Amino acid sequence: MKKVITYGTFDLLHYGHIRLLERARALGDWLVVGVTSDDYDLSRGKINVRQSLAERLEAVRRTGLADEIIVEEYAGQKIDDICRMGIDVFTVGSDWVGQFDYLKEYCEVVYLDRTEGVSSSQLRGGEKPLRLGLAGEVAFVNKVFRESRYVNGLEATAYWAADGRELEDDVRALTECASFSDLLEQVDAVYLTTAPAEHGAQIREALERGKHVLCEAPVSIDPAELEDLFALAAQKGCVLETALRTAYSMAYARLLLLIKTGIIGRVVSVDAACTTIRPVDRTDEKRLGRAWNSIYDWGPTALLPVFQILGTDYKERHIVSRILDPATRYDDFSRIDFVYEDAVAQVKVGKGVKSECELIVSGTGGYVYVPAPWWKTDYFEVRFENPENNKRFFYQLDGEGIRNELVSFVRAVQDGREDRHVDARISRAIAQVLSDYAAGRGVTELTVTE
Ligand code: CTP
């Protein structure tokens, strides 16, 4: 019996796929089809796949052309499959000519002509791309713009910045808008990284006008306002998503799941630090007023693992801050301590103080260690009393999580599906901490002497 194998993503199964499978089958007596796993696609940079592995497997099954279907999970698997299954012919479309010649050592390699005029990419991009407007003046906008270029179905077309000094030429080459309202005129969705105090009014205006919003956390520093905004988004049928790139890192997501399995026993402590040294000009009041202080800028990220691992029902909380400017409440360092029924947590955030930016989750059986800068998680270790039992995990992180965040946003808009990376409960708990900080509730202020 002549065994043939072929591999593909088979997203939104189309005529080109079916023709390929028919011809692959005709090359022998038994056809094995390898369908790529979601993780494998992500790791090889294919981030826009619309259907889940289960849906893609089912679509291939329904063609009735495959005698056997397997999942392709890692680079190099093809050699293993071919040897293990005794494959005689490997085949794939002509878009791959030459790329699989290394398999000739193991079996015959046949490149079949690709069917012209149809592809998954084309089907995915069939809808008009979502026009994204960038609102904000911090350098982070540059990163978001760069990452947006990798995302199908999304096109950053315009920007608005009160002060464009930090924006790079690529961003400035987009349509410049004179006001936030003008920006809304030009686009279908906005990415907001304006000063947190401005978010509320801006999001409301965007939603009222039927525009989707991806807003850098904190979406609001007022829990009541946050509720109103989520309610308005639902009423208008718009997506309002919290941008917190760490939540979109595969390694970070896996870390949370592993902890849930009890691998480190009961969690007793979560410690996270997020710091950067980015001095602000304290004499430039206008700029200081619009600047992101430590607790607004880093707080949501640092609080994310605390709330995601320990929940939001803490019993005590205490904030200690170094407030440089009482008028704007600009802190260059803050420490927040939490006491839960059976655990504690501590986060340190700073924009004028530097510390080791690691994440440590301590449990009764071991601990999870994420090295600095932990918010760009691509690697972590689970460590035990006996180091021989330690486990190391690595997952590729492209674009600091921003790329996946944008993909998730576009998908939420296209499919009308709620994004679950940062749920409303977490956003609410973050807003509560920040609003208490703003009001000075439970805050001890350090004396700033310089
Ligand atoms: N294929 C083909 N003709 C097409 C599209 C795909 O013969 N018009 C073949 C590919 O060469 C590959 C298999 O179908 O052998 C699975 O391709 P896949 O990458 O899943 O589909 P594409 O439509 O090429 O997807 P994308 O646009 O995401 O690259």
Image: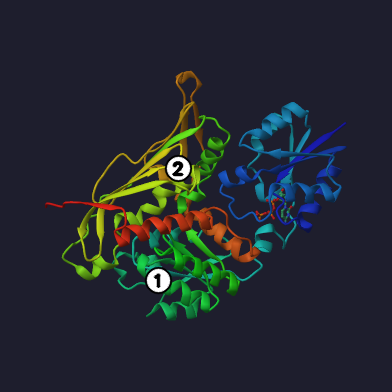
Q: The residue tagged with tag 1: helix, strand or loop?
A: loop
Residue 411 percent coordinates (x, y): 60, 61
- Give the residue number, with chain letter if any, for mark 1: 173
Q: Write down the quadrant of residue 257 in the picture.
A: top right
Q: Left or right: where does residue 287 sit relative to residue 247? A: left
Q: Write down the quadrant of residue 260 in the picture.
A: top right
Q: Is residue 432 or residue 87 the one in the foreground? A: 432
Please say whether residue 158 is visible from this viewpoint. Answer: no
Residue 351 percent coordinates (x, y): 27, 52
Seen at 56% across and 58% down, the residue is 407
Query: What amino acid type should be assigned to the residue bearing mark 2?
Result: Thr
Q: Nearer the viewer, mark 2 or mark 1?
A: 2
Q: The residue tagged with tag 2: helix, strand or loop?
A: loop
Mark drawn on residue 273: none
Residue 29 percent coordinates (x, y): 88, 37
Q: Left or right: where does residue 7 sit relative to residue 212? A: right
Seen at 61% across and 37% down, the residue is 75
Residue 296 percent coordinates (x, y): 35, 58
Q: Colour mode?
A: rainbow
Q: Residues within 10 Å of mark 2 (few under 14, many from 20)?
A: many
Q: Write down the quadrant of residue 385 in the picture.
A: top left
Q: Is residue 413 above or below residue 323?
A: below
Q: Left or right: where does residue 202 sit relative to residue 62? A: left
Query: What amino acid type should be assigned to the residue bearing mark 1?
Result: Ala
- Give the residue number, with chain letter if any, for mark 2: 377
Quadrant containing the N terminus in the rendered view: top right
Q: Left or right: where does residue 234 sit relative to residue 157? A: right
Ranked by sequence position, the earlier of labels 2 and 1 is 1
Q: Is residue 55 or residue 157 the one in the foreground? A: 55
